[in-house]
Amino acid sequence: MWILVIDDEEDMCWALARALSQEGYEVRTATGGPEGLALFRAEGADLVLLDVRMPGMSGLEVLERLRATDPEVPVLVMTGYGTMETALQALKRGATGYVTKPFNIAEIKETVRKVLSR
C-alpha cells in the first residue's frame, strides 16, 4: 500500500514519509497541490494525507479534484489549531477524516492504520 502526502512544508513531508515508511508503507510526497494532483493522477494512492492550508491551491481545492479523479480514495486532511471550520468543510466535501497539527507520530500511524484497514 502506498500513501501520498501533500503538504507545503517539506519538513512535514519528510517526517511523515519517514514515520510511515517505518510502518511498511510506501510513501510519496508533494509540496503543493498541483504537484500532488499530478502524482495522484499518474500513480494513484491507497491513502492521501492532505494539508488544508497551502499557498496557491488550497487543500479544499485539491480535495475536490481528488474526488473528481477518484471518489473512493480515502483522504485525511491535516489542519492546524484554529482551522477546525476548514476541517469540517473538508469532511462535507468528502474527506475521510482529519488530524490536527501539531500531532504526534503515533496518532498519525494509528489513524492511517485504521483508515487503511477499512
Image (cartoon, rainbow, N blue to C red):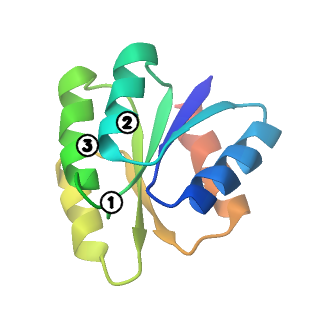
Quick one: SS at disc 2?
A: helix
Tag 3–tag 1 contact (CB < 8 Å): no
Label 3, label 1: how many angstroms apart (C-alpha)? 9 Å
Counting residues from the start of the chain, the first of labels 2 and 3 encountered is 2
Q: In which quadrant of the rendered view does residue 28 lie?
A: top right
Q: Is residue 46 visible?
A: yes
Estimate the x, y position of residue 75 in percent, counting from the top left. Answer: 39, 41
User: Residue placed at 30% from the left, 75% from the top?
Assistant: 84
Which residue in the structure is indicated by mark 1? 52
Name the amino acid, label 3.
Answer: Leu
Rendered position, 53 above or below 82:
above
In the rendering, which numbered label is found on residue 65? Answer: none
Q: CA distance from mark 1 to mark 2?
A: 15 Å
The answer to whether residue 91 is seen in the rendering is no
Counting from the top left corner in percent of width and height, residue 86 is at 23, 68
Q: Residue at x 32, y 44 (%)?
A: 33
Nearer-N-terminus badge (1/2): 2
In the image, taking residue 47 as reference, residue 117 lies left or right, namely right
Given the image, on which type of amino acid does mark 1 rest? Val
Q: Nearer the viewer, mark 1 or mark 2?
A: 2
Residue hosting label 3: 63
Give how far across and how far down residue 82 sits, in percent. 33, 84
Q: Which residue is the extreme one toward the right?
A: 22
Q: Is residue 88 above or below residue 38?
A: below
Q: Nearer the viewer, residue 3 or 73?
A: 3
- The residue under label 2 is 35
| Image quadrant where residue 102 sits | bottom right
Q: Residues within 10 Å of mark 1 (few under 14, many from 20)?
A: many
- Circle 3: element type: helix
Whether tag 2 and tag 3 are in contact, CB under 8 A, the answer is no
> Is the residue 35 above or below the residue 51 in the image?
above
**To which quarter of the image does residue 25 belong?**
top right
